[in-house]
């Protein structure tokens, strides 16, 4: 996972939301402190999400369908009669 990606930066913003709010809205926290907290949490979030992706892995790719057989028509399925003998349809 890349350090500068939407999941990493978004999660870091959510986790440091109170500090960012205190710095930019109410002014109770120095701006450099809030930005430093955001940077540290972004690196920690990147490490955690990278470890998660390494453990879980990527989803499997779907298999390609088998090519159709060269035949004249649809395959016939033998049907069992009342006496249990298979008959062609």
Image (tube, rainbow, N blue to C red):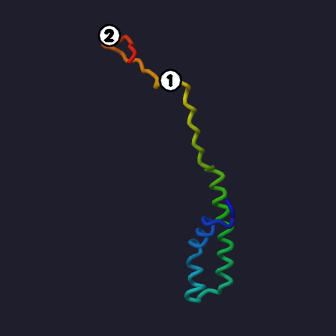
Return the x and y of residue 75 as percentages of the image width and height. Answer: 46, 23
Q: Nearer the viewer, residue 67 or 7?
A: 67
Q: Residues within 10 Å of mark 2 (few under 14, many from 20)?
A: few
Element at label 1: loop
Question: In the figure, residue 63 lies in which quadrant?
Answer: top right
Query: Which residue is at the far front?
Result: 72
The residue under the point 68% across, 74% down is 39
Query: Is 16 positioned to the left or the right of 72 in the image?
Result: right
Q: Earlier in the sequence, mark 2 or mark 1?
A: 1
84 to 58, vertically: above or below: above
Element at label 2: loop
Q: Nearer the viewer, residue 48 or 63?
A: 63
Question: In the figure, residue 3 lies in which quadrant?
Answer: bottom right
Return the x and y of residue 5 as percentages of the image width and height. Answer: 65, 65
79 to 21, vertically: above or below: above
Label number found at residue 72:
1
Residue named by callout 2: 83
The residue under the point 59% across, 80% down is 20
Query: Is 15 positioned to the left or the right of 39 in the image?
Result: left
The residue under the point 60% across, 85% down is 23
79 to 27, vertically: above or below: above
- Report, in whole angstroms, how far the alpha carbon at label 2 lies from the one at label 1: 30 Å
The quarter in which the N terminus is drawn is: bottom right
Query: Which residue is at the far bottom?
Result: 27
Return the x and y of residue 13 as percentages of the image width and height. Answer: 59, 73
Depth-wise, is mark 2 or mark 1 nearer the camera? 1
Q: Residues within 10 Å of mark 1 (few under 14, many from 20)?
A: few
Mark 2–mark 1 CB contact (< 8 Å): no
Question: In the figure, residue 89 lies in which quadrant?
Answer: top left
């Amino acid at each position: 996972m890349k350090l500068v990606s939407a999941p990493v930066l978004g999660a870091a913003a959510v986790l440091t939301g109170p500090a960012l709010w205190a710095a930019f809205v109410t002014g109770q926290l120095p701006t450099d402190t809030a930005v430093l907290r955001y940077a540290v949490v972004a690196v920690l979030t990147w490490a955690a999400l990278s470890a998660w992706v390494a453990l879980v892995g990527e989803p499997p790719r779907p298999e390609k369908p088998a090519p159709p057989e060269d035949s004249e028509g649809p395959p016939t399925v033998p049907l069992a009669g009342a006496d249990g003998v298979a008959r062609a349809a």
